[in-house]
Image: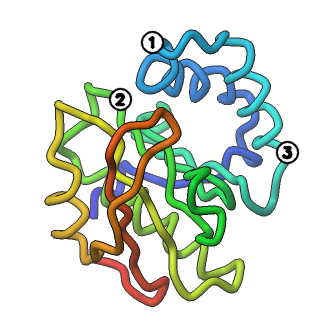
Amino acid sequence: MNNKISIKTLNEYPQYAPILAYWSHIQWYGERKIDFSVNVSSYIQRSQNESPPITLIAFYDSIPAGMVSVTMKDLWSRADLYPWLASLFVYPKFRGLGISKQLVNSAILKAKSFGFSKIYLFIGNNSEFDLLSYYSKLGWHYLDDCVDNDGNESKIMFTSTHHQTD
């Protein structure tokens, strides 16, 4: 493990909410015509939460390098499943350092701390990464095909909160 990397909750560092909102906006919401202020408000709200939805920040030294959230609602068509690992993002400059894996493991542990035995995610449309393979290598399992919140075909995966990768 890289000792320059630390994972903290957004409520410990609320001043970073606008940065995380920006990352979220450029990665997932910019093309959906959702106003940036909506993302900022969402992350400011999360900075006050001690239970889901909660966001974790990866720091490289003292620089925000990535984020992940644990939410109760992520895939509208499957409200019966929760909690969700959502919004995994590592700033491009910091990719390849194992930060995403640490964020995923931290989200799993956070879900476990809230008393959940499983955590879910859905694979968004992403031409940059093979997310199904990535999460499978981390020990996640395919659960079902689904339609995401934008009407695109997707896949649901899950893992036990007792499972973290090395």
What is the spatial separation of the Cα atoms under label 1 and label 3, in whole angstroms?
Answer: 28 Å
Q: Which residue is mark 1?
A: 31
> Can I make out residue 153 in this image?
yes
Q: How many marks?
A: 3
Among the 4 quarters of the image, the one containing residue 103: bottom left
Residue type indicated by callout 1: Glu
Give percent across and percent down for residue 73: 66, 55
Earlier-in-chain disc, 1 versus 3:
1
Give percent across and percent down for residue 86: 51, 50
Q: Where does the N terminus fall, quadrant-wise?
A: bottom left
Please identify, in this view, whether the residue under mark 1 or under mark 3 is nearer the observer: 1
100 relative to 40, above or below: below
Q: In percent of the image, x 52 and y 27: which residue is there?
A: 24
> Few, some or many C-alpha atoms within 10 Å of disc 1 (few <14, some 14-19, many ≥20)?
few
Give percent across and percent down for residue 59: 47, 42
Left or right of residue 58: residue 127: left
> Few, some or many C-alpha atoms within 10 Å of disc 3 (few <14, some 14-19, many ≥20)?
some
Residue type indicated by callout 3: Gln
Q: Nearer the viewer, residue 11 or 29?
A: 29
Q: Nearer the viewer, residue 81 or 110?
A: 81
Please identify, in this view, whether the residue under mark 2 or under mark 1 is nearer the observer: 1
Q: In percent of the image, x 39 and y 79: which residue is there?
A: 159
Mark identifier at residue 91: 2
What is the spatial separation of the Cα atoms under label 2 and label 1, in whole angstroms?
Answer: 19 Å
Q: Which residue is mark 3?
A: 48
The reply to whether the C-beta atoms of the residues labelled 2 and 3 are less than 8 Å apart is no
Earlier-in-chain disc, 2 versus 3:
3
Q: In percent of the image, x 20 and y 57: which residue is there?
A: 132
Give percent across and percent down for residue 43: 71, 33
SS assignment at label 3: loop
